[in-house]
Amino acid sequence: MRVLLVEDEPTLRAQLRLSLQGAGYAVDEADNGRDAQHLGQTEPFDAVVLDLGLPQLDGLSVLQRWRAAGLAMPVLILTARDSWTDKVAGIDAGADDYLAKPFHVEELLARLRALIRRAQGIASPLLRCGGIALDTRSGRVSADGQAVALTAHEYRLLAYLMHRPGRVVSRTELTEHLYAQDFDRDSNTIEVFIGRLRRKLPAASIETVRGLGYRLDCPA
């Protein structure tokens, strides 16, 4: 899962980046509204954490421009403003949720998980596909009741597929959503991680759809 973090305060941005990365997200950053607007319109993100008080272009204007352009990625706004009118303005501009500063990082992560699930029509934080179970809260994965140890990249890949069970996902889409913009993207890397996951998961869990991509097969 790939997240855009937009926050102009360097210390808070660094703390949030580390927390998001620790939770298994690929993270792109922007410290002003104009860069944020450009990134949001040119790169695919699974969710955005957007501060409202930004230099060059305020967060509310960034959000309004994204929505006017037809971009539908979930957006969690951060605001130091405690007025209910500011929160209403953010929601009306197209935000999916808001969090007032100061906040606990655990709450931000929980809200972000919920937004990403909701965008895929998933209600439960425990994702299941056949004998595979992935707990988005703890990051634990099991197969047929047995714990499965995954690297960060393997977990990120499996989580992306688990949020889209039965859907064909292209290698390009996986690459765009699993790595930040500045990551050295090798086109063969996805195949390597798919191969590793197949060795750790029940047989035939991940199907190759020739010429199209991969599909997580979830038997009834």
Image (cartoon, helix red, strand yellow):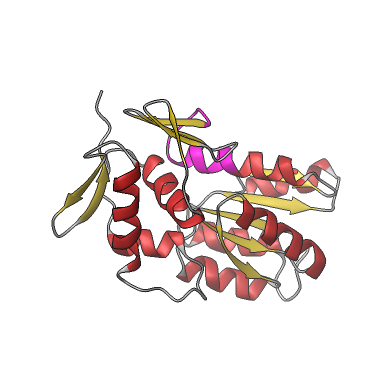
Would you identify the image quadrant in which residue 129 lies? top left
Q: Position of residue 190 (x, y in %)?
A: 33, 62
Which residue extends farthest left?
210
Quarter of the figure that contains the C terminus? top left
- Residue 120 within the segment the image draws in magenta: yes
Q: Is residue 126 above or below residue 213?
A: above
Which is more toward the observer, 108 or 134?
A: 134
Which is more toward the observer, 25 or 68?
A: 25
Q: Position of residue 51 (x, y in %)?
A: 72, 59
Q: Residue at x 69, y 49 (%)?
A: 90
Q: Residue at x 67, y 58 (%)?
A: 50
Q: Image check: 187 left or right of 49?
A: left
Q: Residue at x 85, y 51 (%)?
A: 81
Q: Is residue 110 above or below residue 46?
A: above
Which is more toward the observer, 103 or 69?
A: 103
Q: Is residue 184 above or below residue 151?
A: below
Q: Position of residue 131 (x, y in %)?
A: 34, 28
Q: Position of residue 91 (x, y in %)?
A: 66, 45
Q: Residue at x 79, y 61 (%)?
A: 12
Which is more toward the observer, 52 or 174?
A: 174
Number of numbered markers: 0
Would you identify the image quadrant in which residue 8 lies? bottom right
- Residue 106 within the segment the image draws in magenta: no
The magenta stretch is 113-125
